[in-house]
Amino acid sequence: MRRSGGLAGIYTMAVAGVFLAGFFLTVVFGAQTYREIAEGQSRNNEARALLSYISTCVRMNDTPGAVRVSREEGEPVLVIADGQSGYAIRIYRYGDSLVEDYGEADGALYPDMAQVIGETEEFRIEELENGAYAVVTDAGRVLFGLRSEKGVAADD
């Protein structure tokens, strides 16, 4: 009789061990899945922020002649004039980052003092047929039209 009691104890411990191993595997796989989802959401938020920021800068300063595209050593620079002050926000790629600086609209760029907007290896600005622009980065593409160019007030 004692022998069957010993086997019952071993069987009970084996079943408990299987359940414990299953629990730990569930926790490990759940943690990995959560980490992957959180990282994906973070990348998505960064991509949206990058494109939204560009669009917002343009829309906030949408006055006649305020937005233009220039080239600095072959790289595009989005120049957004700050009213009639002669100064502008300049958005361009420096290294692997999209940066923004503020200075004279036609002055030299200051990439070492610029604020990093986000990481990107691609930055293109396309002028479309209808007077709209498309800005393309690693995060995607954002389209914007200049309302002031069409004679519509910027606050409409």
Image (tube, rainbow, N blue to C red):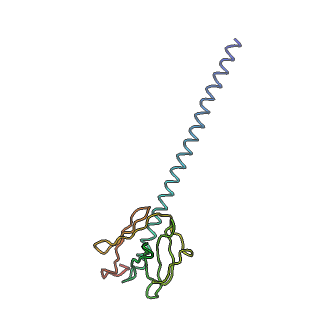
Q: Position of residue 67 (x, y in %)?
A: 39, 79
Q: Position of residue 4 (x, y in %)?
A: 67, 14
Residue placed farthest to the left in the image?
129
Above/below status of 8 relative to 29: above
Question: Which residue is drawn at the image coordinates 40% and 66% (left, top)?
Answer: 136
Question: Which residue is drawn at the image coordinates 51% and 82% (left, top)?
Answer: 103
Decide which of 76, 41 is in the foreground and name it.
76
Q: Quadrant of the N terminus?
A: top right
Q: Quadrant of residue 13?
A: top right
Above/below status of 40 relative to 92: above
Q: Quadrant of residue 26?
A: top right
Q: Position of residue 115 (x, y in %)?
A: 54, 72
Q: Is residue 154 left or right of residue 108?
A: left
Residue placed farthest to the right in the image?
2
Above/below status of 124 relative to 63: above
Decide which of 30, 134 is in the foreground and name it.
134
Decide which of 83, 74 is in the foreground and name it.
74
- Count of numbered labels shown in the rendering: 0
Above/below status of 14 relative to 90: above
Q: Is residue 25 left or right of residue 70?
A: right
Question: Which residue is drawn at the image coordinates 36% and 71% (left, top)?
Answer: 144
Q: Quadrant of the C terminus?
A: bottom left
